Amino acid sequence: MKKRLIILMALFVLSINTAFAANVNSYSQDAKIRSALALLDKNGAVEVFDNLDFQKAQVMFYDFSLISFSQAKHYAMKAKNGNKNYILINSRYKNAPVEAVACLIAHESFHKLPKATFEEEVTATTQEAAYWMKLGNKSKDYGDDPLVSRLNGLSDLYSASGGRNNLIKEKIANSSFYQTQLN
């Protein structure tokens, strides 16, 4: 009897893990994005998955130059096609480390409004930096990856912030890019 109970408990635990793994896979067909999502899951990014579920978002790489020349160098964005919601990661970052891709997914998941506001951008960017501090491997050499460079800069601002001194908020407020995007 005890042996059966242990076997049933083991099967239950394995079925929960399998079910959630299938859920992670339901967000994207891309292996790298699935790896990034699995990394987020492994690190307890519950709010990211709550956001993805609420938005019913699919995540994919996309060539932003097909949207417009001015958006060709953007990192990531949310898009809607009919009733489907997408988080698009610029295909320029397809070779970026999985940890960095995970941070972009986290960032975009915090955009909930149809058009981003200043406060929403501050929250999303702050969360992106916080996830990089959690997921980025300090002892790993990422080379000169541009996405990693961005994340290192954000995590430096995040670390140096405190109390009323939010350096990420200041950076966004003083950015000509965000001034045009958020107005």
Image: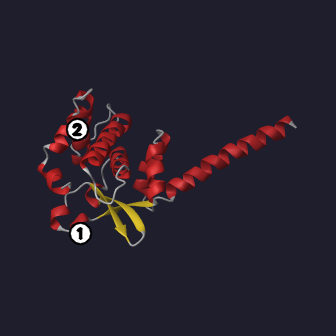
Q: Can you say whether 6 is above or below 159 in the image? A: below
Towards the viewer: 145 or 180: 180
Q: Residue at x 33, y 34 (%)?
A: 133
Q: Quadrant of the N terminus?
A: top right
Q: Can you say whether 118 is above or below 162 in the image? A: below
Q: Quadrant of the C terminus?
A: bottom left
> Which residue is denoted by mark 1 in the rendering?
67
Please provide percent x and percent y for residue 3.
83, 37
Please provide percent x and percent y for residue 165.
21, 29
Please provide percent x and percent y for residue 18.
61, 51
Q: Residue at x 27, y 29 (%)?
A: 159
Q: Residue at x 34, y 41 (%)?
A: 127
Kind of residue sitting beneath label 1: Ile
Towards the viewer: 85 or 21: 85
Q: Quick one: which residue is furthest to the right in this view?
A: 1
Say whether residue 51 is visible: yes
Q: Residue at x 47, y 55 (%)?
A: 54
Kind of residue sitting beneath label 2: Ile
Asked which colour scheme the image uses, the reply is secondary structure
Q: Can you say whether 152 is above or below 98 in the image? A: above
Q: How many marks?
A: 2
* Pointer 1 local density, CA inside 10 Å: few below 14, some 14–19, many at least 20: few
Alpha carbon distance from label 1 to label 2: 28 Å
Towards the viewer: 97 or 18: 18
The image quadrant of residue 123 is top left
Q: Quick one: which residue is furthest to the bottom in this view?
A: 82
167 relative position to 100: left or right: left
Towards the viewer: 54 or 91: 54
Please provide percent x and percent y for residue 58.
43, 61
> Which residue is denoted by mark 2 in the rendering?
168
* Pointer 2 local density, CA inside 10 Å: few below 14, some 14–19, many at least 20: many
109 relative position to 21: left or right: left
